[in-house]
Image (cartoon, rainbow, N blue to C red):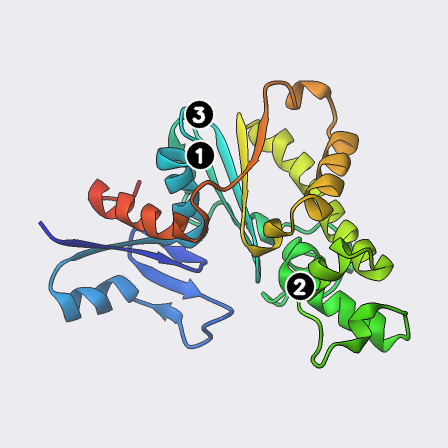
């Protein structure tokens, strides 16, 4: 039987197949995506949060295989997450659980894309890294980034950091520190066996991962949370969401 599985930005209701609100697609407000696709293609449609499905895929096919307690975090334009607890995807009461990018980590911090302030996404995402670099240059700080023909992106900041640029290195370390501090809190809440990190910012490598790990080890409340913990990067890369949607479609229900 042909079925469609959809990985969509959230928040959304996976049971009703409704997109509640997606900041990057403002037209999708309480949008019945599953019904819309069902009417077009005439087949069953299931949807879930894209980060949830990436977590599901990493658990089934990727870096989380063999672990029934997994935390997946993707750091790119935004910060998304998915949580596997006891071999099941954590959805919460209405399918809204796992929005870890929207946990407040700095009081009165910068405004997040969701409209609130001080969220992890507004401090550690690729968008946040680019914004911080642009602010620093506008304030007159010296950097090789000032010579770029366009405002610096997170990729450009990472490249400059690898080349030894002091400002770029500081910005990457600050963003990584925010994520490491938040991750320590997530370990306290979920106590996973494996943490899988994905997304474009993670591709920066050690200039981001080393300060993240340093902060995590400093901030965690007890070393027991780190014992036998696997901290690794995504094995599936950009295919994680696609494979998660496939897994969801094959499951014939909300996972």
Q: Position of residue 216 (x, y in %)?
A: 72, 35
Q: Do the residues labelled 3 and 1 touch (CB within 8 Å)?
A: yes
Q: Where is residue 8 in the image (x, y as percent from the top left)?
A: 38, 59
- Callout 1: 10 Å neighbours few (<14), some, many (20+)? many
- In the shown orientation, is residue 110 left or right of residue 227? right
Q: As drawn, which residue projects farthest toward the left? A: 1
Rendered image quadrant of residue 140? bottom right
- In the shown orientation, is residue 126 left or right of residue 73? right
The residue tagged with tag 3: helix, strand or loop? loop
Residue sitting at x 71%, y 77%: 151
Q: In this rendered view, identify the residue nearer to me: 106 or 173.
A: 173
Q: Distance between the residues labelled 3 and 1?
A: 9 Å
Q: Quadrant of the C terminus?
A: top left
Q: Distance between the residues labelled 2 and 3?
A: 32 Å
- Determine which residue is flagged by label 2: 154
- Determine which residue is flagged by label 3: 67
Residue 27 higher or lower than 64, as above or below: below
Q: Distance between the residues labelled 1 and 2?
A: 29 Å
Q: As drawn, which residue projects farthest toward the bottom? A: 149
Judge depth for marks 3 and 1 and give the one in front.
3
Residue sitting at x 73%, y 47%: 207
Judge depth for marks 1 and 2 and give the one in front.
2
Residue 84 shows which numbered tag?
1
């Amino acid at each position: 039987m042909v079925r469609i599985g959809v990985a969509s930005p959230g928040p959304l209701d996976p049971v009703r197949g409704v997109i509640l609100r997606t900041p990057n697609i403002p037209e999708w407000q309480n949008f019945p995506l599953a019904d819309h696709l069902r009417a077009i293609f005439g087949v069953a449609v299931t949807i879930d949060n894209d980060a949830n499905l990436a977590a599901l895929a990493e658990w089934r096919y990727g870096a989380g295989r063999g672990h029934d307690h997994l935390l997946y975090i993707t750091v790119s334009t935004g910060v998304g997450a998915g949580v596997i607890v006891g071999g099941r995807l954590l959805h919460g009461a209405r399918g809204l659980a796992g929005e870890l990018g929207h946990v407040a980590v700095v009081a009165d911090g910068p405004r997040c894309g969701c409209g609130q302030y001080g969220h992890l996404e507004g401090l550690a995402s690729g968008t946040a890294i680019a914004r911080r670099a642009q602010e620093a240059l506008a304030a007159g700080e010296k950097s090789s980034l000032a010579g770029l023909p366009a405002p610096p992106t997170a990729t450009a900041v990472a490249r400059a950091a690898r080349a030894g640029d002091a400002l770029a290195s500081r910005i990457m370390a600050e963003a990584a520190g925010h994520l490491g501090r938040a991750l320590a809190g997530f370990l306290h809440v979920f106590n996973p066996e494996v943490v899988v990190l994905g997304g474009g910012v993670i591709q920066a490598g050690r200039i981001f991962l080393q300060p993240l790990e340093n902060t995590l080890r400093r901030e965690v409340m007890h070393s027991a949370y780190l014992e036998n913990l696997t901290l690794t990067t995504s094995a599936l890369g950009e295919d994680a969401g696609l494979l998660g949607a496939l897994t969801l479609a094959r499951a014939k229900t909300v996972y």
